[in-house]
């Protein structure tokens, strides 16, 4: 199979897996990350094939979507349950007969990608990883980021806002992952931090604009909450 055919097949596979998600991680999130990553490639010297594979497969094993296995069973994917590997992405790459070094690079990107708490560093070794991380993070901020945050909060049964529970700057992935706090907190715990964590200059510029939209939204949200318009 040519790389083009493999990308095509991979896109079809991922689309099938994500068709019914309602947590803000649906197929269109993958499409946006894929397109944004390709757009960022134009400004960087990166291997586009690696970027495309990692963008398409990046959420297949995400802990937010794949339930943790019961304690008495061995881990079955679901990143990172402990030091888990992205089992489903890995199996797919093997099935597509991808060169092992390339498959390993794609898995490394998937493992390193996710935000893991305000005080937890998530460095990316390669430009391909940096691009996919930027693309994924750009989709978490701005107007779409706002929409996704509330979709995710609703999916998890979180409140919109709880004035009595201030945001927490999580020092470990465990704490971040287990937080059930209101969605407005998520802006302070993650989304407003992302603009300073972009890797590429192009993503930094776009993130600054999207950040400004979130700040306006939060100001207006609080004005309405406090009855400040009357
Ligand atoms: P990451 O792997 O960095 O978390 P994803 O693409 O998997 O990136 O998804 C992140 C999305 O999940 C964000 O857009 C965010 O809206 C949503 N999300 C995660 N945790 C929460 C939360 N506690 N409250 C609201 N949204 C959340
Ligand atoms: Ni994602």
Image (spheres, helix red, strand yellow):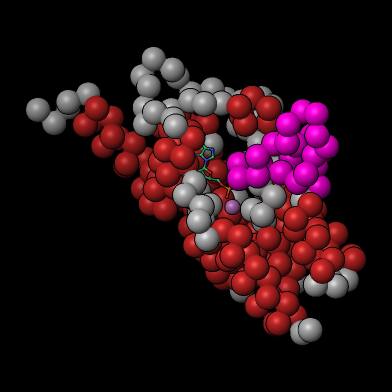
Left or right, residue 136 beside residue 155: right
Where ligand 1 lies, by image quadrant? top right
Q: Is residue 83 magenta?
A: yes
Q: Position of residue 55 (x, y in %)?
A: 65, 62
The answer to which quarter of the image holds residue 69 is top right
Q: Is residue 90 above or below residue 140?
A: below
Q: Residue at x 37, y 31 (%)?
A: 160
Q: Residue at x 49, y 46 (%)?
A: 23
Camera sees residue 211: no
Q: Position of residue 218 (x, y in %)?
A: 34, 36
* Magenta stretch secondary structure, dominant: loop
Q: Which residues are magenta?
A: 63-85
Q: Is residue 60 above or below residue 82?
A: below
As rendered, which of 156 and 109 lies closer to the eye? 156
Quarter of the image that includes the C terminus: top left
Residue farthest bottom in this picture: 2
As rendered, which of 166 and 156 lies closer to the eye? 156
Q: Is residue 132 magenta?
A: no
Q: Position of residue 169 (x, y in %)?
A: 57, 25
Left or right, residue 107 beside residue 24: right
Please count the marks in the image.
Answer: 0
Camera sees residue 186: yes
Q: Is residue 112 above or below residue 227?
A: below
As rendered, which of 22 and 70 lies closer to the eye? 70
Quarter of the image that includes the N terminus: bottom right
Left or right, residue 221 beside residue 91: left
Residue farthest left in this picture: 230
């Amino acid at each position: 199979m040519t790389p083009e055919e493999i990308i095509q097949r991979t896109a079809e596979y991922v689309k099938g897996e994500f068709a019914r998600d309602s947590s803000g991680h649906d197929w269109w999130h993958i499409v946006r990350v894929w397109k944004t990553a390709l757009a960022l490639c134009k400004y960087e010297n990166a291997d586009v094939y690696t970027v495309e594979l990692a963008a398409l497969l990046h959420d297949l094993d995400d802990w937010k979507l794949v339930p943790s296995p019961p304690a008495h069973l061995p881990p079955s994917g679901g990143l990172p349950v402990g030091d888990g590997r992205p089992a489903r992405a890995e199996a797919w790459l093997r099935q597509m007969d991808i060169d092992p070094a390339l498959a390993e690079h794609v898995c490394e990107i998937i493992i390193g990608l996710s935000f893991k708490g305000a005080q937890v560093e998530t460095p990316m070794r390669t430009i391909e990883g940096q691009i996919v991380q930027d693309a994924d993070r750009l989709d978490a901020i701005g107007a779409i980021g706002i929409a996704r945050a509330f979709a995710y909060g609703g999916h998890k049964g979180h409140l919109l806002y709880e004035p009595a529970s201030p945001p927490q700057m999580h020092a470990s992935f465990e704490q971040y992952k287990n937080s059930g706090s209101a969605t407005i907190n998520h802006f302070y715990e993650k989304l407003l931090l992302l603009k300073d964590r972009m890797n590429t200059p192009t993503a930094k510029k776009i993130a600054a604009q999207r950040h400004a939209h979130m700040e306006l939204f939060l100001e207006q949200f609080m004005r309405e909450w406090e009855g400040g318009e009357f």
